[in-house]
Image: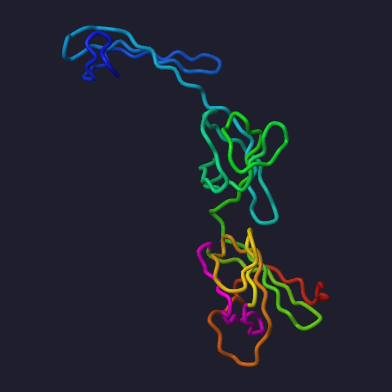
Amino acid sequence: MECSICGSESVTTLKSKKISAKTKEINELLLKCNDCQSVFKESISESKPISIRLIISEHESSKKTSIDIYPDEKLTKGNLLLSDMGEVEITSLETKDGKRVESTITENISTIWTNSIEIPARVGVSVDLTGKVDSFKVELDRDFEFATDDFIKITAYIIRINVIKTQERKIRDGFAKARVTQRIYGKPVKFNNHDYDLTDKIVSRKGLEPKRR
């Protein structure tokens, strides 16, 4: 804030009054310059936050709420938001014309699609039994890390990870955090050594199914 008379940035606020309009908030200030002693008025206006529908995914279920954000704020896929249901990560933005985009300003948005980051990651585990697949879902800390060629114990199986399927791609040589991993694929091996045991992390099991080709 500068003095309107001498241009000094050394000013003191004597009075402040907020006026609320339909879409804006106006802050009327009475200021005094500490250099030339002039007293002058200044108004600062800013847009009010707008309420946007927020969808929070929690594995197979979802919750609806809303969040207040300034209309000129830019949102991007991957941004974190603090909602009334905890911290969430943006996965997609739906605009008022029904399109899904990865980045735009808030005033263009009708719905923000998100994932909760305050619950464990849920990851599928597929055990390839040559013609059939035994399928599990496990819940893990979001920062748990999978790597191809890891040896995993799950129920009576010891499997080696061949493929890690993430939200973006399939990994055949590398690693991924549980928070971005959708499913891991592996085949049983004929020894008992393993890197970690996921048996007590199982939340569901489909059982044997024909292998998809």
Q: Position of residue 198 (x, y in %)?
A: 59, 76
The correct choice, above or below, for 34 with respect to 190 in the image is above
Residue at far bottom of view = 191
Quadrant for the N terminus in the image: top left
The correct choice, above or below, for 111 with respect to 179 in the image is above
Quadrant for the C terminus in the image: bottom right
Residue at the (57%, 32%) spot, across then down: 106
Q: Main secondary structure of the magenta part?
A: strand
Residue 42 appears left or right of 181: left
Q: Position of residue 31 (x, y in %)?
A: 27, 12
Residue 97 appears left or right of 82: right
Q: How is the image coloured?
A: rainbow
Residue at far left of view = 35
| Residue stretch rendered in magenta on the structure | 142-161
Residue 128 appears left or right of 118: right
The correct choice, above or below, for 61 with respect to 169 in the image is above
Q: Is residue 178 magenta?
A: no
Asked where in the image residue 150 lies, by quadrant, the reply is: bottom right
Nearer to me, 207 or 104: 104
Asked where in the image residue 68 lies, by quadrant, the reply is: top right
Residue at the (53%, 62%) spot, across then down: 142
Residue at the (40%, 16%) spot, across then down: 44
Q: Is residue 147 magenta?
A: yes
Q: Position of residue 116 (x, y in %)?
A: 58, 51
Q: Position of residue 184 (x, y in %)?
A: 65, 71
Asked where in the image residue 37 lies, by quadrant, the reply is: top left
Residue at the (50%, 22%) spot, across then down: 47
Q: How many marks?
A: 0
